[in-house]
Amino acid sequence: MVNIVIFGKPGAGKGTQAEFLKSKYNLIHISTGDLFRHHIINKTPLGLKVNSILENGDLVPDKLTIEILENEVKKNKKANGFIFDGFPRTINQAKKLDDFLKSLAMQISFTIALEAEDEILLNRLLKRGETSGRSDDINKEKILNRFKEYNDKTLPLKEFYSKQNKFFSINGVGGIKVISERLISIIENS
Ligand code: ADP
């Protein structure tokens, strides 16, 4: 079983690469962002609660995020493995994920960060905002807030996973296929 955490700032290409890895290695792809957006579109109680949080580019409180993640894993107990996209995003989430996976006799195999400069990411997101319908992609201030949330709360995960010898990072700038090859090389050689 292989369980991969893919992280990177907004616009780094997590979702695109996660979809690729999902089909290549037959994994279950869990994107907490997609799950929240699904709730928002369907106006569920959770969706109504988190709507303005996503719109502003803030992080959803850990408790809600961990709950939604755990439910999704439990639904897919027979999976070959998981690709976690956009989770964990805080140290607390990472600790809770470790404990939760341990309780299922599972663990994270490795974590891979897609790296790119803010200016490139900002341009990618504004471009995506033209067609994605995502309100958090059209406003520069909100995008910069998402970068700040990442720097403040998610970046410490590098050290957290490095201590477990599970942290890798790759250059996230280049063609989609080239980046997929970089990911494969880490997955198959580590
Ligand atoms: P991006 O990485 O481009 O910001 P995502 O779809 O991963 O896109 O996340 C969109 C939003 O969903 C985040 O800005 C945040 O509000 C919420 N979100 C997603 N994952 C988490 C998480 N693990 N913890 C807290 N909030 C999250």
Image (tube, rainbow, N blue to C red):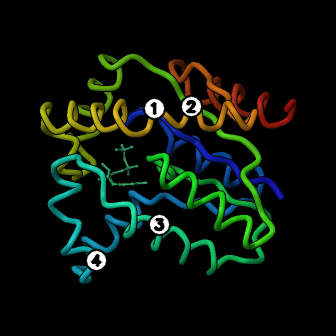
Query: As shown in the figure, which amino acid type bears the numbered disc 4?
Result: Leu
Q: Which residue is mark 4?
A: 46
- From the viewer's perspective, tell me whether residue 1 is left or right of residue 58: right
Query: As shown in the figure, which amino acid type bears the numbered disc 1?
Result: Leu
Q: Give x and y (percent) for residue 85.
A: 53, 50
Q: Badge 4, how many Cα within 10 Å: few under 14, some, many 20+?
A: some
Q: Residue furthest right?
A: 189
Instruction: State which quarter of the image contains the C terminus.
Output: top right
- From the viewer's perspective, tell me whether residue 147 is left or right of residue 99: left
Mark 2 residue CB less than 8 A from any atom of ligand 1: no
Give the residue drawn at x 26%, y 82%. 44
Q: Badge 2, how many Cα within 10 Å: few under 14, some, many 20+?
A: some
Q: Which residue is mark 2?
A: 158
- Circles 2 and 1, Cβ within 8 Å, touching? The answer is yes
User: Which of marks 3 and 2 precedes in the sequence?
Assistant: 3
- From the viewer's perspective, tell me whether residue 5 is left or right of residue 181: left
